[in-house]
Image: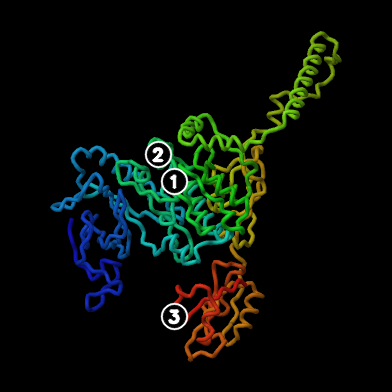
Amino acid sequence: MITEKRDLCMGCMSVLDESGKCRCGFDEDAPTYENCIPVRTVIGEKYLIGKMIRMNGESITYIGFDKENEEKVFVQEYMPGKIAKRSDLTGEVVPFSGCEAQYKTLMADYYDLFDSLRNFRHTEYLMPVLNVFRENNTVYAVYKYIKTISYGDYLSHNGGEFTWPQVKKLFMPLFTTLTYLHSNGFVHRGISPESIRVNAKGQLLLCGFGTAALFSKDSIVEPDLSAGYSAPEQYFPGSWQGEWTDVYSVAAVLYKSLTGTMPADAESRKEIDHLCSPEKLNFNISSEVSDAIMNAMTLNSEYRTRSIDDFTAELLESASSNTKLFGAAEEEIIKEAEDYYPEEKEEKAKRKIRLPWGVIATIIAMAILLGLVAFLFRFTEILGFGNKKDPNEPSSSISEEQESSVQGYLISMPNFVGRMKTDVENNSQYASFEIIFEEENNNEYVEGMIFEQSVKYRTEVEEGTTVVLKVSKGPEKIPMPNCVGMTVEEVTGKLSELKISFQLVPNYSAEHDYNIVYDQSVEAETEVNIGDRMSKVLIYYGALESGGSSWGEDDDDQPSGIVIIDGRG
């Protein structure tokens, strides 16, 4: 490794001031973790390494600087501290004695993972991987620098919970991304409020990738499991993991988002399952959404919602049936789950509908009678007592082969809701359907996302069937009026009438006239969304100090003298 001095802060990669200091306050002389790369080290001949940002059992992430392109980056280094350490002399990562084979195998998996992620640049909902390379007997993955906060922090800053329309708008693009990853053979395994990031546009980005070993208990590296969000099979060695593992985790994130309550961790639920349904914690949650989340968080993976598409369909009430069908290969994979959760199978069996014995006896009797009639009819036909047909008379019946030809080959309708239009059009995967796109304004789905399909998910249809897909044009927009100089009452009435979501921000300094608006966060005539509660216009007005306590419920998180009042519009 080589080191280099630059006029950059190693804490944030901003230019240092004339005194050699930075406003972020990072101290280069502060002690670092034992296995971290020294700051100002250059790797790959162009990446300057700064402070350590995060560390888990498999890797260490640093802020970095790409000298060639003159831009900030994130650099993630393969560094499994349980089976390896960094050499003080060479800076190389050296496996412990006896762990060489494990280290090499895991490093190969790590390289393959990020090399594949580097090719997934068509989706804007993944943290982009720019480069992957080997050096110092380890692997480095370079991410594009995007300023984000964790979804957990974002949720906390917005009162700790969201409504279902807000959650739907936030998560549908992420569901599409997960479906794409799963279709390419990838399972994340580490989805949680920390591995989901929120950018400046309010979009959710998926990051926190790692090998399977990182997200399994009792693995060769220190596991990085998230209490409340990791699926139960991740706690039991030898259990099969798959798409259903991510289904559990993302459902747990939705559980937290809608109720403000972190779900009990799967390991403790195995002993005593007291997980309360979302609708019992928040009466505003519909039973359909609540049931979809509970189905996706079922402990036994055999009975859990199996894919993100199925989960999306249940959330949007698009699925024609809640029955889960599995092929022989899937049955072979999931049959061992009964050994871990026998009581859940028994509980599920208790919930099955039981018919009264009288009804059952009637059904059996009718079946026997119908069978006897069919037998007698066939018997008389064989003996020649039935109506004989003129051999010269043209046949009016259709053979099974002809009928199959007439009906066409039946195929199952895929779930298009939640996918982007660009991912569907001209996609050979959907060549069996005649697809028509119709665009409409929609406040709950981002622009370009499909929010409705004319044929329900999993409906059996013929090849060539026409399906109409409605695509969101985003929220309807309207020019922002000029509110400066108006009273608070006038602004409230005006913006409510226009259905513009807003927040009132009082200022208690004497320089502003009482109850008069003096500024707004969006300039007049700028187009704003109608009815979009996720995008609020801030309205600033003069207020009296004595009225401060009557405006808000939680003033501790607001700047001194400022309280935000939510105007729903």
Q: Residue furthest left?
A: 89
In this view, the mark in front (1 or 3): 1
Q: In the rendered view, tell whether residue 435 sits above or below residue 382.
A: below
Q: In the rendered view, tell whether residue 105 sits above or below residue 552.
A: above
Q: Is residue 277 left or right of residue 119?
A: right
- Which secondary structure, mark 1? helix
**Residue 74 in the image, given as x and y percentages of width and height:** 32, 59
Q: Residue at x 81, y 8 (%)?
A: 383
Q: Which residue is mark 1?
A: 268
Q: Is residue 359 left or right of residue 458?
A: right
- Which secondary structure, mark 3? loop
Amino acid type, callout 3: Ser
C-alpha separation, residue under disc 1 versus residue under disc 3? 42 Å
Tell me the number on the disc at residue 236: 2
The disc, 1 or 3, on the residue closer to the chain's N-terminal end is: 1
Q: In the rendered view, tell whether residue 363 sits above or below residue 65.
A: above
Amino acid type, callout 2: Phe
Whether residue 542 can be seen here: no
**Residue 231 in the image, given as x and y percentages of width and height:** 45, 45
Give the quadrant of the N terminus.
bottom left
**Residue 110 in the image, given as x and y percentages of width and height:** 32, 45
Tell me the number on the disc at residue 560: 3
The disc, 2 or 3, on the residue closer to the chain's N-terminal end is: 2
Q: Residue at x 48, y 91 (%)?
A: 511
**Residue 551 in the image, given as x and y percentages of width and height:** 55, 78
**Viewer-proximal residue among 381 and 231:** 231
